[in-house]
Image: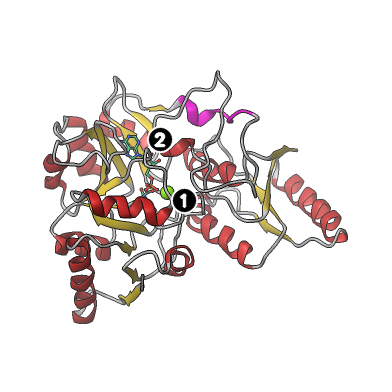
Amino acid sequence: MNTRILDIQSLDDAGRTAIAEAAAVLRRGGLVAFPTETVYGLGANALDPAAVEAIFAAKGRPADNPLIVHIADPTALTEIAREVPEEARALAVAFWPGPLTLVLPRHPRIPLVTTGGLDTVAVRMPDDPVALALIEAAGCPVAAPSANRSGRPSPTRAAHVAEDLDGRVDVILRAGDCRVGIESTVLDLTGPVPMVLRPGIVTPEEIAEVLGVPVELDPALCQTPGPGTPGPGTLESGTQVEEEATAPAPKAPGMKYAHYAPRAEMLILRGQEDAIRARMDEIRREREAMGQRVGTILFGAADYREAARDFFARLRELDGQEVDLILAGALDEGHSLGVAVMNRMLKSAGYHVIDL
Ligand code: TXA
Ligand code: MG
């Protein structure tokens, strides 16, 4: 397949023409990668089972991992979910457009292939003018996972999408870099209590404040998978992380898969910043003496948003430099934004952590 890259500098006439072209591709069942505020998405008409199947094929994604349906207007919720609870309406008012995904009962018009066979559906309205214009012009809800090959770091720049999907999608809409940098918070509203299935930049505290009730975190998120976890280098697309019999399965099917793996070996150092720096230098010297190349990822202690924005790009950058080892400094998991970034960092490193 010949992938067309269409540049969008702004939503002027040229930008609108590119969006109209991409929307036509979506309407005829094609695949379009597009920017959102979180990460680039790989879109198809959510109502067209064959188009949605093409997303799974292009990504190499397991069929039981459901997609998020993107809408351009909160009123479209009633066409995606068969019931829209008051909580969902309140959260949409508070956070949409924005990086919060709601899991609700599936409307019968949403094909099961879109929801990975589940009777629930994930939906969000992204906060990006290009994404919103594209969905509007397509005139249909757009199913879109992150626009990476399954198992690879999520793409926060158009160049990352091209790296993974050139030749596998019809169109890449090339706009600026994503400003959030990690994927949306996924909140399940179909259970007895609102539950975060994937942490993101919208925190449980912010959600609880709107709902006036406590919000839980999927217990599986707080647990390190068992010793069967494949290490970096052994990760294949869709490889399922084996868990100990006692570990609960995550409620978002995607959270059980190996994820975000750089090609290099990766190790997380957890402790005080000084201790992290010292140990990083020590390990670097050891490895360099062995002829290896070492890259580091270290964010300022309180720079959670910057860490979220740059983490995936940094992984891809270090892969591009063909380092053998990536050393990353842990963020504070006492902070909800730290939890969100650490969720990705731990998966990237195959849960290899040294506590200092
Ligand atoms: O920020 C984002 O959410 C990006 C942009 C493109 O919008 N999209 C994204 O999609 O990250 P994806 O497919 O990479 O991740 C979707 C996550 C997966 O962990 C999936 O298992 C979960 O949401 N999910 C989707 N539908 C679900 C459902 N009905 N029940 C539980 N989890 C669901
Ligand atoms: Mg993804």
Q: Is residue 137 visible to the viewer in this orientation of the structure?
A: yes
Residue that appears at 68% across and 57% down = 296
> For the view shown, which residue lies furthest in the bottom direction?
14
Residue that appears at 33% across and 41% down = 66
Q: Which amino acid, by three-letter code, is at mark 1?
A: Ser
Question: Toward the viewer: 60 or 230?
Answer: 60
Q: Quadrant of the N terminus?
A: bottom left
Q: Which amino acid, by three-letter code, is at mark 2?
A: Pro
Q: Quadrant of the C terminus?
A: top right
Mark 1 = which residue? 150
Q: Is mark 1 within 8 Å of ligand 2?
A: yes
Question: Toward the viewer: 255 or 305?
Answer: 255
Say left or right for 306 vs 178: right
Q: Is mark 2 within 8 Å of ligand 1?
A: yes
Say left or right for 32 vs 24: right
Asked whether the residues under the numbered discs 1 and 2 touch, taking CB atoms below 8 Å apart as contact, a structural biologist would say no
Picture coordinates of residue 55, whole percent (x, y)? 33, 54
- Mark 1 vs mark 2, CA separation in Å: 13 Å
Crowding around mark 2 (Cα neighbors within 10 Å: few <14, some 14 to 19, many 20+) is some
What is the span of residues highlighted in magenta in the rendered image?
Answer: 219-226
Say left or right for 136 vs 253: left
Mark 2 = which residue? 253
Upstream in sequence: badge 1 or badge 2: 1
Picture colour scheme: secondary structure
Q: Tag 2's secondary structure?
A: helix
